[in-house]
Image (cartoon, helix red, strand yellow):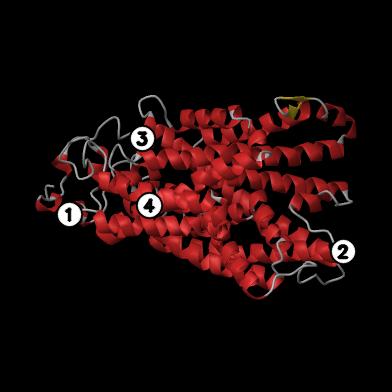
Amino acid sequence: MTDMCDRPATKETGAASSVLYTYDLAPTKREGRRWNAYNVFTLWANDAHSLGNYAFALGLFALGLSVWGILLAFALASLLLFLLLTLSGYMGHKTGVPFPVMSRIAFGIKGAKIPALIRGAVAVAWFGIQTYLASTVLKFLIVAIAPGLRTLDTHTVLGLSALGWVTFLALWGLQVLIVSYGMQVIRKYMAFAAPTTLITMCALAVWMFIRADGSISLSNAHPLTGGDMGLQILQGAALWVVIYGTFVLNFCDFTRSAKSRSSIVRGNVIGIPVNMLFFALIVVVLSGAQFKLNGHIVTSPTDIVRTIPNTFLLVVASLALIVLTVAVNLLANFVAPIYALVNLFPRRLNFRRAGLVSAVIGLVILPWNLYNSPLIVNYFLGGLGALLGPLFGVIMADYWLLRKSRINVPDLYTEDPQGEYHYRRGYNPRAVWAFVPSAAIAVVLALVPAFSAVAGFSWFVGAIAGAVLYALIADRTTQCRDVDGEAIAVHAE
């Protein structure tokens, strides 16, 4: 293979291709970098407190983890996430490119479609599911205010009642509208949603604590002990990291607009260890207080919201949960497939059109049927999720271990065969060879019942296997320097 480092990295390698370079995929210029530490914090403040995350964390109490075990699991997971997300965030800040373009570094200008499609497919499915979960809260709120509308919640069409369709489509349309105005409006929505979410969930926890006479149960009726408890703590921490396996891949979609590295670090410090431990405290108060009250193990904040006797407070709490779920969806499940689709069809789609296409796909898959089918969730979404670890391992090993973060950004947008990221017909076979076996290992661990005891660690096993395999077989000539010593921003967002 030709030593790519024998030639100087220059802008003259080849002209930018209209297939690879568009307004939405172009690097962010300095004037487009408007995300400060608070904006990064609001990303995590919104995402950590999603309905799905509460269901997962409350489930740890149901599985037998004590209050202290839950707090320890989240402390361990937060430290791991802080490290992973900071490294991933630095990549976005330096290069200024979104995830589909970042993937070109390791997988090639054409091979990058592989990780972008996998990440996008996971996100589209969860976009529909999260919209459905928010619509159930809205449906409950409407019935609580106007009980006569309960008749619209009886007969179903394609799995949803008439009221279910109205609430789902209303929230679906709201998210499409917000996304149509681009990333800056998403940033502003997050800034509004974050304090609303934190105040509401804190108030809900205080209300439950008062109802339980100022104390909580420290565990359920059948607490885990000894080795079982230790394994469940590690499994809980690992699964919490897995939940963010999507974000550690495409965090660059957001940090490409960060003002500085310090804004990423400060936002991550408050948003991950501090915010997630605050989240864990709310979880243990909600679960412990409810169990003390009646021996019932709560599985979702909506179960508690439904017990609020005051109509005004019920409305406020329900609206806050809806605002929160929409924020999470915009961040975790809408942006990634938009960039993936723009990367696939650059001449036909821009950010707004790709957002509409993503939303339509999220609708036509009838996500409520996916959510209500454990088989589909476990095998389809679980299998796709297991692939994210190996992708992360390959991309991080290429960027940090081999290239030492030195990237020739203009070559990410050229189809010139002499370009650094053209590899072999646009694909880096070494990245594919490292990804395939590590992905197979991760999927087997995640889905085969015989490995259920270690299924929670499949993301880590896949990530480590992908990184190690790639480091062993990758051509060391990929360790080239970037243009003029730093990443070049070609276009403003």
Comes first in the chain, label 2 or label 3: 3
Q: Are marks 3 and 1 in contact (CB under 8 Å)?
A: no
Q: Residues within 10 Å of mark 2 (few under 14, many from 20)?
A: some
Residue named by callout 3: 23
Disc 1 to disc 2, how far (Cα)?
64 Å
State whether residue 235 appears in this view. yes
State whether residue 331 appears in this view. no
Residue 202 located left or right of residue 438: right
Report the disc number at residue 293.
2
Q: Residues within 10 Å of mark 3 (few under 14, many from 20)?
A: some
x then y, percent, for residue 247: 49, 51
**At 76% across and 49% down in the image, what residue appears?**
302
Identified by mark 3, the residue type is: Tyr
Report the disc number at residue 477.
1
Residue 303 located left or right of residue 262: right
Residue named by callout 4: 92
Report the disc number at residue 73.
none
Tell which tag, 4 or 1, sits nearer the viewer.
1
x then y, percent, for residue 435: 36, 48
Identified by mark 2, the residue type is: Leu
Task: Say what secondary structure mark 1 lies in.
Answer: helix
Please tell me which residue lies in front, 50 or 25. Answer: 50
Disc 4 to disc 3, how far (Cα)?
17 Å
Disc 2 to disc 3, how far (Cα)?
56 Å
Tell which tag, 2 or 3, sits nearer the viewer.
2
**At 90% across and 30% down in the image, what residue appears?**
148
x then y, percent, for residue 320: 71, 48
Farthest residue to the left: give it.
Answer: 6
Identified by mark 4, the residue type is: Gly
